[in-house]
Amino acid sequence: MKQNYRFGAVIPAAGLSSRMGAFKPLLPCGDSTVIETAIGSVFPYVSTAVAVVGHQGEQLRSVLTSTFKDHLTIVTNPDYASTDMLRSVQLGLCAIRDYDAFFLLPADMPLIKPRVYETLIDAFDDSADVIYPAFDGRRGHPPLISHAVVPAIMTYRGEGGLRAILSTCATKEVKISDSGILTDLDTPRDYENIRK
């Protein structure tokens, strides 16, 4: 890991899981849950991390507090039912400190391997504002986003949310030989594929 840089993580977990038909973050995943697996994968690589909860927030807060104790900051998006991921990211960024870049890690992506974080960190420098992992020509998660982009994220009020902001940034892709960076949980079929 690059010793001169500090990294954080923002984990949006406030959504309604409407397409899944069940609450995605707390679905079983191995010996744990989807969100615990996802957060556990990033912790060795960050010094600060925040999860943003909303739907079923108290239940999720209880699970995360039990697992991660005071190592994870948890904040609530009270407007989760009427806002998109951008609002959760803004709230999350208000709660983390002292970082040069942050991983944006959706709570429904439990298959991201350590090598992904290591590769993104190795690629981090001043040449790009956002570094994406890419598999088979497709960008995946988690992007590593420079602190330089944070003012634009915090003040944006236009259409298109976070995607619109990041589309204006200088970007770089690093090739990853792992489809886990593309594997999220939107539907019951997605979940069954992950379980297999």
Image (spheres, rainbow, N blue to C red):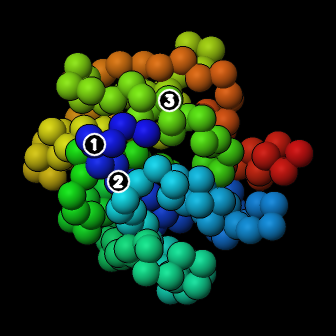
Q: Which residue is mark 2?
A: 8
Q: Amino acid at mark 1?
A: Tyr
- Mark 2 or mark 3, earlier in chain: 2
Neighbour class for label 2 at 10 Å: few (<14), some, many (≥20)?
many
Q: In the displayed structure, would residue 176 be above or below residue 151?
A: above
Residue 5 - label: 1
Q: In the displayed structure, would residue 133 be above or below residue 159?
A: above
Q: Amino acid at mark 3?
A: Thr
Query: For residue 60, which quarter of the picture?
Result: bottom right
- Image spot of residue 24 (x, y percent): 65, 62
Q: Helix, strand or loop at disc 2?
A: strand
Q: Residue at x 65, y 59 (%)?
A: 37
Q: Number of labelled discs?
A: 3
- Residue 146 visible, this orientation: yes
Q: Amino acid at mark 2?
A: Gly
Could you say which is closer to the camera, residue 23 or residue 141?
141
Q: Are marks 2 and 1 in contact (CB under 8 Å)?
A: no
Could you say which is closer to the camera, residue 14 or residue 94?
94
Q: Which residue is mark 3?
A: 119
- Image spot of residue 95 (x, y percent): 25, 68
Q: Residue furthest right?
A: 196
Q: Does 166 sit left or right of 134 as displayed?
A: left
Q: Label 2 to label 3, Cα distance in Å? A: 15 Å
Residue 72 - label: none
